[in-house]
Image (tube, grey):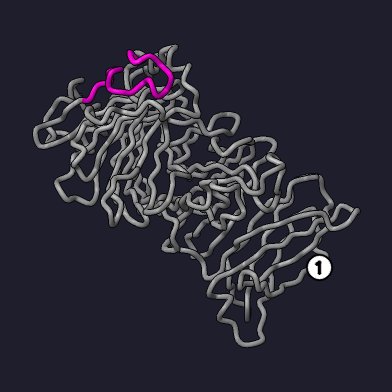
Amino acid sequence: MLNWRSLGLLLVVCAGAASATGKDFDFDALKARARQQAAAAYSPPPEADAVLAQIDPARRDAAPLKVRYAPWSMASRFVPLPLAPRAGCAPTLFSSIQASGIERFDYRPELFDWSAAGLPEAGPAATGFCGFRLLYPLPGDGKREDLARFEGDAWQLVGAGSLFGAAALAVGVIDNDGRAQPVPFREFWLVRPAAGARQLRLYALADSPALAAAFQIDLVPGVASRADVQVALYPREGAGKLLLAPLAGSFVQGEHRPGRVLPLQAEVHSVDGLAIHTAAGGWLWRPLDNPPQPSAYSFLVNTPRGFGLLQRDRDASHYEPDAPHPRQPDLWLVPGGDWGAGQLRLLEAPAGSAAVRNVQVGFVPDQQPAPGAGMELGYAVHWSTDASLPRAGGWVIATRSGAAGSNGSRRYAVDFVGPALQGLPPGAAPVAVIDIGRGGSLQRQQVVANPHTGGWRLLFEFNRDTDAPLQLRAYLQHADQPLTETWDYVDPPR
């Protein structure tokens, strides 16, 4: 179960905790600080220097940290590089925990090369950084490349050979309009690893008008990089519903609605679907959408075995030349322990470019913590472009839709692949199980072999008897046994 703890008597933590010895600083100390912070009135970050607003968002990394000012030696296996402050990013503090104690690394304009951003070398005033990036040697040549990035309310890892794409968020707070408001990071402490270490521990403090949160995160690089997370949340009065362990990505358009936003391009997305592994062992796949208005959908799955935003289409010919999308990783989350009753909430918002993370998914517990109480949970997050992440024996790789005549009927084509579909007896074909929600009626269906994918294509048509969104579900089976995950989609009104 989620670990609920009454605040009880506040632990008194001195304001100079960050100057204590490294041995005195651990997750329990950070939780005590977060509890104390949540019990006090929220203190908003200072307004950004007007000079920062002059930096083009497309060039947000154009002012790099000068290498000679790196907090750790550039010969270290892990190399953290604080990111320059920018408008719209809550300023963050940065400290290093090492054998000699805790060393604070304070912002100074001369740390960065501002000329690369078109600003005077004197640089802008600021009270902190905008998170940090973390370098790690690539397999083989040992050249250091980006492993992780923490900024604002989001953090990302990459697996070997992949690029930054989908992100994990600190925590979300669902407002009265159903949107998830972010809780930004405000301070980081990195534990300097011993020479040759292959993982790194960091602590982070997040804060917003709704809550304060303490994080312990262990980063483990690899072909599929992993982060093991422990988080303690302390809501303030009026916090609202929490969106726990949220993941975020961008989806502009895909093969099921090509050209709707960007007519001259086919597919534009860092992720193209939500996968859910239910507690009962079933699998579900929801293709993502870029709706004209913000939308929310809930999946009643108490403590799922896993869920994630995946990038299944890695065919470079489906994107613009040199687009990063085929190399952006899948993002998969595995809960640690029993999170109890609740639901996964999928939030989708309109977006005109892949620079906007317009898709979020996270867990909303039925029992929300009250102000004056804390909540703790753990989970692991994986970033990967290989096939090592868990999946069903048969899965969806493409969804296409269109009109089926002039009478308002609709047609869908769903492509399934996977080893479960290749192990059928000679001459056997899978059978489709289709559910058309209330307000629609199935007219015809067909399952045909698809020689281009080595799998099977489900074709079906239905009539609409409603102007409301229509819930569709389908999977393939043989001998009354499911072979694939369940394809889940909402057909929008036309």
Residue toward you, 426 or 25:
426
Q: Is residue 53 above or below residue 388?
A: above
The location of residue 487, given as percent across then percent down, is 63, 60
Residue bearing mark 1: 444
Determine which quarter of the picture holds residue 146: top left
Residue sitting at the far right:
406
Confirm whether residue 371 shows in the render: no
Residue toward you, 107 or 142:
142
Determine which quarter of the picture holds residue 91: top left
The residue shown at (71%, 65%) is 434
The quadrant the C terminus occupies is top right
> What's the amino acid at mark 1?
Arg
The residue shown at (46%, 20%) is 55
In the image, which residues are magenta?
105-123
Q: Secondary structure at mark 1?
A: strand
Confirm whether residue 463 shows in the render: yes
Q: Is residue 28 above or below residue 463?
A: above
Q: In the figure, is residue 430 to the left or right of 69?
A: right
The residue shown at (41%, 30%) is 61
The location of residue 208, given as percent across then percent down, is 41, 25
